[in-house]
Image (cartoon, rainbow, N blue to C red):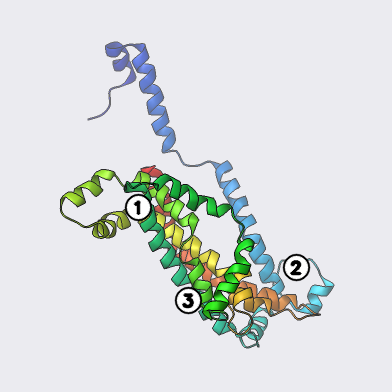
Amino acid sequence: MSAPSLPVIRQTAGRGAARAAGRSRSTAAGSDRRPGWVTYTLLGIAVVLAIAPLYYAFLLASSNSVYIAQNPIPSLIPQGEFFTNVGKVLNGDIQFWKALSNSIIVGVVTSLSVVLFSTLAGFSFSKLRFRGRNALLVFVIATTAVPTQLGIVPLFILMSEFGWTGKLIAVIVPGLVTAFGVFWMTQYLESALPYELVEAARVDGASMIRTFWHIALPAARPAAVMLGLFTFVASWTNFFWPFIVLGNQNPTLPVAIQLLQASYFKDMSLIMAGVTVSTIPLIILFFIAGRQLVAGIMQGAVKG
């Protein structure tokens, strides 16, 4: 059944109702309107600004040290040395493949762990009632204000006491859960998971762990995917702590790329080739998880 026209509404309900109906219809029509050229122009500029650093690194990776010394601002056309430089990086003395596998192991393990523990903590803080809940949540969030560098010395001493220096476990264990992840999942589950669903599961005889696994975890999937993706990227690009605790014998990818520069000479073409190669897995990951990422953002916006 079609909606009544504005003249009919004016005759039956008055001019005020007709004006209100006209405004609501114009708003609904505006929501379905396609973006204009201004929107696409701004998006295009944002895309260019985002791609420009990576393309600049690719241009340097396609050159050689002599060309870079003669042309500090490279040509926008690649010079054709990219695969040669990539071959030097892959077959060099920096243990690239071992560093790549180490980064994948650390990234996958920490991402899964952060998602699991953060979702579990977020479910507890958002839906369970226990004494000191708010104070404990504030304390967890307050730890994000402490700089990472302040805990490096005691953390390194602790890893030495455990005999974990030079091993991947020294990088994995400190990153098993993050305060940001707990805060992220708490805020999401607070609005996305109705408390009535938790009560219904408890009435049906489900344990708290089963309620979390079958009710809370599926409801938190959009936010969990985003948290896992951000955690993986942060772990993949982390340099400071792995450089200190792992050293050069068992490096992750950022540490291995740092080894490309010698003490007195830096071949920017090799360094940028390593940077470009290390970025390719992240680009592939974003292409694979892009649909789920956008779906998670949209679903979170609708639920909010």
The residue where tag 1 is placed is 124
The amino acid type of the residue labelled 3 equals Ile
Quadrant for the N terminus, please.
top left
| Other-residue count near label 1 (Cα within 10 Å), few / some / many at <14 / 14–19 / ≥20 | some
Locate residue 157, reporting x and y percent: 59, 73
**Mark 2 or mark 3, which is nearer to you?**
3
Residue nearest the observer in this picture, 264 or 179: 179
Identify the mark at residue 207; answer none if there is no mark. none
Is residue 71 positioned above or below 187 on the image? below
| Other-residue count near label 3 (Cα within 10 Å), few / some / many at <14 / 14–19 / ≥20 | some
Is residue 67 positioned above or below 137 on the image? below
The amino acid type of the residue labelled 1 equals Ser
Picture quadrant of residue 5: top left
The residue where tag 2 is placed is 75
Q: Is residue 194 left or right of residue 89?
A: left
Q: Could you tell me which residue is drawn at 65 percent across and 77 percent down?
A: 257
Q: Is residue 162 left or right of residue 203?
A: right
Q: Could you tell me which residue is drawn at 62 percent across and 67 percent down?
A: 152
Residue nearest the observer in this picture, 98 or 280: 98
Picture quadrant of residue 256: bottom right
Total of numbered circles in the picture?
Answer: 3
Is residue 18 positioned above or below 239 on the image? above
